[in-house]
Every structure is written in C-alpha cells, then in structure tokens.
Image: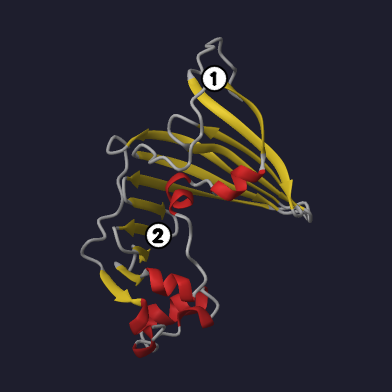
Amino acid sequence: MLVACGNRAAVPALDLKQSPPPVAAEFRTTVQLAQGGQSATEWRFWRSHDRSERENPAAQTGDLWVRDDRTLFHTRLDHADRRGIEYRSEDLQILNASPDWAALATLLDPRLVGALHERESGWRDGVPYRRYTGTIGDVTWDITVRTDQMLPTRTERRSADRQVETVELLQSFEFGRSPWQPAASAEYDILDFADLGDRERDPFVMRVQAEEGGGHLHGHAH
C-alpha cells in the first residue's frame, strides 16, 4: 500500500466526459478462483487522442481501437502471424459489442463508476486518487483511480461465487516515453470482418473462430 502524504491540495475531479491525457501503462490481471488456484496476466496499454491499444506480450495478441468523426474501428491483432481482423461500427453493433469510448480510453466504465459510492480521496506519494466501492447485482467492486492520468490503479471485482479478479497498475508513463512501444501493425495483413465468410478455410480465421466460440465470426454481417 502507498502511504498517504500530507499534501492537502484539492484532488482533481474524475470527469470521464473529458478527453484523458495520452499515456502508456502496464497492468497485471490476477484471477483467484473460489475453489483455489490463481492465474496472472501482464498486459500493456497505450492511449492517445483517438486511439486506444492493448497488448498481451506473452500471448502475442492485441486489440486496437481507433475512432474518427464518423465511425469506430476495432482491430484484433495477432502479432505472431502479423495478421488481424477489423470490425467497423456496424459490425460491432451486429455483434452487440459496441463499447463506450470513455471506457476504452480510461479502462473505466462511466456507468459503473457512476453507480458506485466515492469512499475516499486524497494523495499518495504525490499522486491524486479517488476510491469507489459498492455492489452491483451480485458483484462487489472496489476501484481506485489515479485522477491526474484518468487510469485505475486497482480494480477488484468480487463475484458471488467468491471468484476475485484484480487489475493493478504496475507502472505508467507519458505517451511516447515508455520503455516499450506498440507493435508496428501498420503492415499486417488485415481482414475485414464482413469478408470472413469467404475465408472460412483460412487457418488463421479458423483459429480465431474457434477461440471466439464459433458463431461470432461467420462473415457477411452487413
């Protein structure tokens, strides 16, 4: 635990409607099963004005989200194969997978945070934070947010079955100053989700389809 310091300056508000500052960060997700056993995954995150990217170095996979004035694009990346699948806004709507941009950019669901109670706020090691707790349905939440960077430093999700998922911020940097950068995916072979129906024998498509449970990727969604 970080120790609260004596700085009594006002803690910046958490306004998820505002554009967050560009950052690069590294997180660890830990899952503790009710029956015992634990898994942990470390992943990286980059955020700029209209771009949000996550990367799992161990799995060599990633997710890139880009928006413009008209639409939102999601590209699922496979760095080992240097390939990807791109979903446009209409594809995401058909798949019932249209996320809130603020949630993609801040890793915080505005509706969830709005439903929780602010338990405390202050400064730790010169860093401003706000902590939110509460129970929604059968899930108990405990979220601490670094308000200057608009990033969660710790998110705990405790289910009724006693499974606990914890996401912790390991380190963060100004955008472009981190010791690691996103994979250079601009030259990857990117497939359009709408065309996957014509590529069902492609080993890459078959593998992704199996990982997604089958029905997710049958093409010609338009």
Q: Is residue 24 left or right of residue 128?
A: left
* Place of residue 91 in the rendered image (x, y in percent of width and height, measured from the top left): 41, 74
Q: Which mark is residue 123?
A: 1
For residue 23, what is the image quadrant? top left
Residue tagged 2: 63
Label 1 to label 2, Cα distance in Å? 32 Å
Q: Is residue 17 left or right of residue 64?
A: right
Image quarter (top left, top right, bottom left or bottom right) of the C terminus? bottom left
Q: Nearer the viewer, residue 125 or 137?
A: 137
Image quarter (top left, top right, bottom left or bottom right) of the N terminus? top right
With respect to residue 106, does 217 lie above or below? below
Query: What residue type is disc 2 on?
Result: Asp
Q: Mark 2: few, some, or many residues within 10 Å (few <14, many ≥20)?
A: some
Indicate the secondary structure of the residue bearing disc 2: strand
Q: Earlier in the sequence, mark 1 or mark 2?
A: 2
With respect to residue 220, does 79 lie above or below? above
Q: What sort of colour scheme is used for the picture?
A: secondary structure
Indicate the secondary structure of the residue bearing disc 1: strand
